[in-house]
Amino acid sequence: MSVFWTPPWRKLFRTKAIPIIVVQNYKFLELGGEPVYLLHRRQAGDLYEDEVTSFDLDPVAGMYYFVLWQPSENEEKFPDPRSVKIWVNEQPWNAAYAPDIFKPNAQEFSLWIRKNAVDQNTQAELPDEVRVYFNPLFTGVGTVRYSFTTICKCIDLSSMQPTRANCPLCQLSTFGWEQYLNPNRHIRDQMMPHTFLLAWPATDTNLVLDNQGFVRESKVTHWTSPPPFSPYVFEHDVIVRMNDIRYEVINKADRRFPDILVQQEFDVVEVEKDHPVYNVPVTRN
Ligand SMILES: [Zn+2]
């Protein structure tokens, strides 16, 4: 008998510890899922949390907003746009790319960022400012809680690269990435330990369990099972395919039954090839 022998009752206990609905959903995933790697965005920088109860109405856009950051508050540090989280009356709202693409009746906010801008007429420098705009659903009444982590002001927001050579602040608080490794040794032994299975919308077999536990066909989004089979995926994490094409996670949503996390759904957008995340090495096994 090998020293790695496990008593059957312990195996049974381990299997039973995972809710059956989670296991069933994983079985669906095994039919059409593709093994991928994941890079978790590591939150670096200082964390800022506060709340606001009074809002300004933008007369042109017809939307309420509040000022998230002004240089007077934190001269050298700037909110990392990808880290901003908003709760309206304790309800989490989702981030949209821009106020003009708000979905009707969706609980969405968007950032308005002015950085290194000059006045068109006078060529005078305009003060940097970051605002949070709300979907017109928001009536300007309530308590809004927010949090964000800071990055150095020298970071170029489109490439997320430092623009100052050897910037001391960037070296102190660089944002980074951590590759996912399944923490469950039992599951690690069965599959490639750095991978998890992801269903893409184009796969033939894309059956999932809905909120009521019924089998349905998924057409819209990418989905994966919850831990322990998959990582808990966060907005803006990066999915790496076997061919090294990298994708950013957006519009993340969790499906629960009744309160057990049974499925994680999200959209992906392909990352530009010159993005720094392409320089992050990936362990392939
Ligand atoms: Zn810097």
Image (spheres, grey):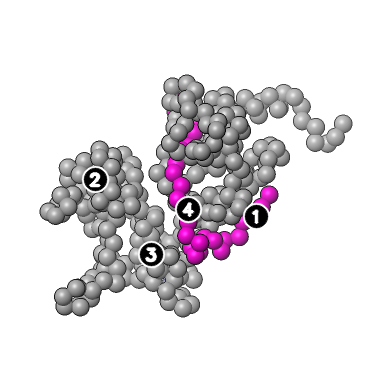
Q: Which residue is mark 1?
A: 283
Q: Position of residue 132 (x, y in %)?
A: 26, 54
**Measuring 27% from the left and 46% from the top, which residue is drawn there?**
102
Q: Is residue 10 above or below residue 40?
A: above
Q: Distance from label 1 to label 3 (Cα)? A: 28 Å
Residue 160 vs residue 95: left or right?
Answer: right
Q: Position of residue 98 (x, y in %)?
A: 29, 53
| Element type where label 4 sits in the image | strand
Q: Which residue is mark 2?
A: 135
Q: Earlier in the sequence, mark 1 or mark 4?
A: 4
Q: Residues within 10 Å of mark 3 (few under 14, many from 20)?
A: some
Question: What's the mark number on residue 270?
Answer: 4
Return the residue nearer the eye: 128 or 284. Answer: 284
**Measuring 56% from the left and 51% from the top, which residue is drawn there?**
240
Q: Earlier in the sequence, mark 3 or mark 2?
A: 2
Q: Earlier in the sequence, mark 4 or mark 2?
A: 2
Question: What's the mark number on residue 222?
Answer: none
Q: Residues within 10 Å of mark 1 (few under 14, many from 20)?
A: few
Q: Distance from label 2 to label 1 (Cα)? A: 41 Å
| Element type where label 2 sits in the image | loop
Q: Which residue is mark 3?
A: 157
Q: Earlier in the sequence, mark 4 or mark 3?
A: 3
